[in-house]
Image (cartoon, rainbow, N blue to C red):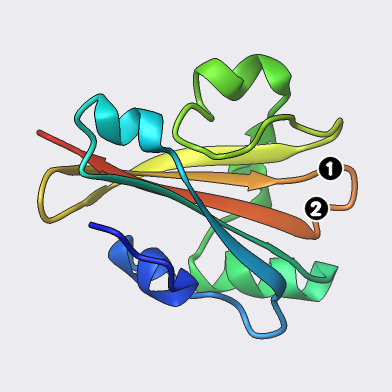
Amino acid sequence: MDLDNPAAILALAGLVLPEGAQNVRVDTKPDLVELGYHYAYTVSWDGTSATTQAFLDAHQIEWVTLLPRDDSHLVTFLREMAVTSVPEGSVGRDWSFHANPGYGQVGLLLDGPDHTTIHVAVSAFPS
């Protein structure tokens, strides 16, 4: 699967791009596809605190469920995400979804300290 439409990528996991998102970009993780993943995309965008809150509200994500993230998480929780560094004060979380085919994983990262840049990794691998 090769997508370059951010809305289509987010839709794979039942997510929607918030209104007001700016500088929307898509990155891939070809190294994971080489390891057998069906796909591994990261959709990133810049916005405002209102844009961030709208995204969280639309997907029923509570701030208290977002955990601190830093560079040490790049090889664990953020492995599926196409980011190379994590700013201080960043928060995020992961969850699974039913992908077709395979097992789906979403990774969410809100860059600190203001949490107005968001990265969403959407990946699927054989179940």
**Residue ID for mark 2:** 115
Question: Up-down: is 62 above or below 92?
Answer: below
The quadrant where residue 102 appears: top left
**Residue ID for mark 1:** 112
Q: Are marks 1 and 2 in contact (CB under 8 Å)?
A: yes
As drawn, is 35 to the left or to the right of 6? left
Element under disc 1: loop
Q: Position of residue 95 (x, y in %)?
A: 39, 42
Out of 83 and 120, give the one closest to the viewer: 83
Residue at the image position 63 percent from the left and 44 percent from the top: 109
Q: Position of residue 75 (x, y in %)?
A: 53, 17
Q: Position of residue 7 (x, y in %)?
A: 44, 75
Residue at the image position 69 percent from the left and 76 percent from the top: 21
In which quadrant is the C terminus drawn?
A: top left
In which quadrant is the N terminus drawn?
A: bottom left
The quadrant where residue 38 appears: top left
| Image disc number at residue 59 | none
Amino acid type, mark 2: His
As drawn, is 84 to the left or to the right of 65? right
Amino acid type, mark 1: Gly
Out of 38 and 52, give the one closest to the viewer: 38
Mark pair 1, 2: CA separation: 5 Å
Q: Residue furthest bottom?
A: 19
Element under disc 2: loop
Out of 110 and 31, give the one closest to the viewer: 31
Question: Up-down: is 11 above or below 76?
Answer: below
Q: Residues within 10 Å of mark 2 (few under 14, many from 20)?
A: many
Out of 123 and 68, give the one closest to the viewer: 123
